[in-house]
Amino acid sequence: MSTKGNLLLSSNLLRSAAAISLLFVTSCGQRQTSQETIPDIDLVSTADDVANIELASAYSQDASWQLARGDVMARLQRAERPQAARNVILFVADGLSIPTIAAARIYDGQDRGESGVENVLSFETFPNVALVKTYNTDRQVSDSASTATAMVTGIKTRTGAISVAATQGFESCEQDTVMPWTLAEIAEDRGMASGVISTARLTHATPATMYSHSLSRGWETDGELPEIAVAAGCVDIAAQLLSFRSGDGVDVILGGGRRSFRPTEMGGVRTDGRDLVAEWRESGRGGVSVESAAEFRALPIDGTEPVFGLFSDSHMSYEADRDASEEPSLAEMTGFAIDRLSQNENGYVLMVEAGRVDHAHHGTNAYRALTDTQAFSEAIATAIERVDLDETLIVVTADHGHTMTFSGYPARGNPILGLVRTNDASNPGSTELSLTMADDGGPYTALGYQNGRNPRLDDSEPLTDEMVADTEFMQQAGFPRMSETHSGADVALYAAGPRAHNFGGSLEQNSVFHLMAYALDWHATTIENENLTE
Ligand SMILES: [Zn+2]
């Protein structure tokens, strides 16, 4: 069985307790044991050992026991892939905290009519998981610019910095200043293909770190640079896509943020009169630009020309609000990029950002955070179908977390966005569920925020089922803030493919870059500084 097959086996096993039951009927035999027997746990080293071993327990037919035994079997059959990766795909969901993953897993399962907790998101089938420390050089709780910079350049930097070092100031905008290399720049320099996808504006912090260097994440377009920055020769983020400094430039770039690339005369916000989309098309590479889902879907997947897709003026829609006739899904954009980029014989690097999990959290609207996470999971499923994990490393992570918590003892099957109803644990066997009340006499939801727009106040109206079922509902928050904040907690990282086994334990965020570079065999390379000037 191929290693790719193992991953699918593992996924199927996790998804289906029934399938595991069948496996164990054949492997466990009919041995009966008494409840008093102490489980006889041997050390096992091969899949055959696992298949043969009979743990002595009266509960060996229990579904959860069998699920766990199937999991052991799948893990023992996994093979490491020590060979170098040809391609790397970095999936980043902005603000995807661990509680968001847990809640989205349940939401996704309940969306299919299941109780939810048993569901597995696409990336949760990956064999390697790490915890990532997200602090930056000046804050315990970071922003997306500094955290994405850590992942794509290999250095930690300060809040707001886009692929520049914490020590760099206005002098760095001068022509001859050395900037940190980015994942996309190194790939292009080596003759690989590169791609950047985001549901946010393409000039927003995370995607911008791949192709630009800016002292401030706020300089998305020319009018946003302060005079001192203009005087120092700094260039806005959108314009830097045109002056990309290595190889032949980013090959596939898809997302939102048209306004920063267009002059005011054409409905954009640029004050310098430049139409960067036209300049990009006319830059000599034969690039194609598309601005609607229809134009995008009409592109042949075997085409070789660079593609620039801008599907909205600012951010693309939340998945819950997306009109599929106007904007492609994250999964569609991911599949297209993989098809296009994999034609390069030297391989590719691709960043795919679900940019708006973060925005929904800032607005304490858990519904849109969960539905955008569901779309993120679907995009990764598309990648798993398309690539060969013997040659493509897939890394799935977040830049930072948010303050959303998942708590309050809801019963299994309780709607994840609903009021908490639960069973009476002091009355075993009782299946009756009742509304759980806080000590102020009001009901509450399982998902809530440490801060945000909707603080729970003494005179607040008690929540009702109707209120929390509204897709615009803002979860309750501990203390008031117009924009809910990021969190400083570690985020999770999931990896599959060549050298994915090196992603494990507790990681510094900038180590993510170095582990991807190692997987690509870039570690034996000197990055030449003379090529760095813009
Ligand atoms: Zn944010």
Image (cartoon, rainbow, N blue to C red):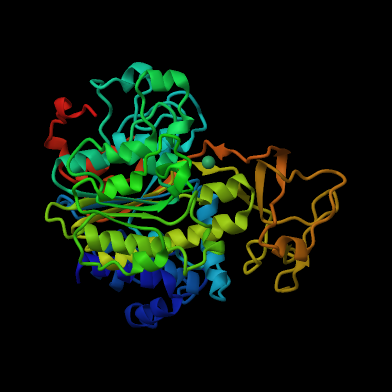
The residue at 57%/70% (across/down) is 110
Residue 534 in sight in this render: yes
Which residue is at the front of the view, 191 or 230? Answer: 230
The residue at 19%/37% (across/down) is 246
Figure quadrant of the C terminus: top left
Residue 104 in sight in this render: no
Which residue is at the front of the view, 260 or 477? Answer: 260
The residue at 35%/79% (across/down) is 23
Q: Residue 233: give x, y in percent of width and height.
A: 34, 22
Q: Residue 91: give x, y in percent of width and height.
A: 37, 51
Which residue is at the front of the view, 145 or 420? Answer: 145
Q: Residue 85: give x, y in percent of width and height.
A: 18, 51
The residue at 44%/38% (across/down) is 270
In the image, residue 222 sits, relative to residue 368, either above or below, namely above
Decide if residue 217 is on the left or right side of residue 340: right
The quadrant in which residue 434 appears is bottom right
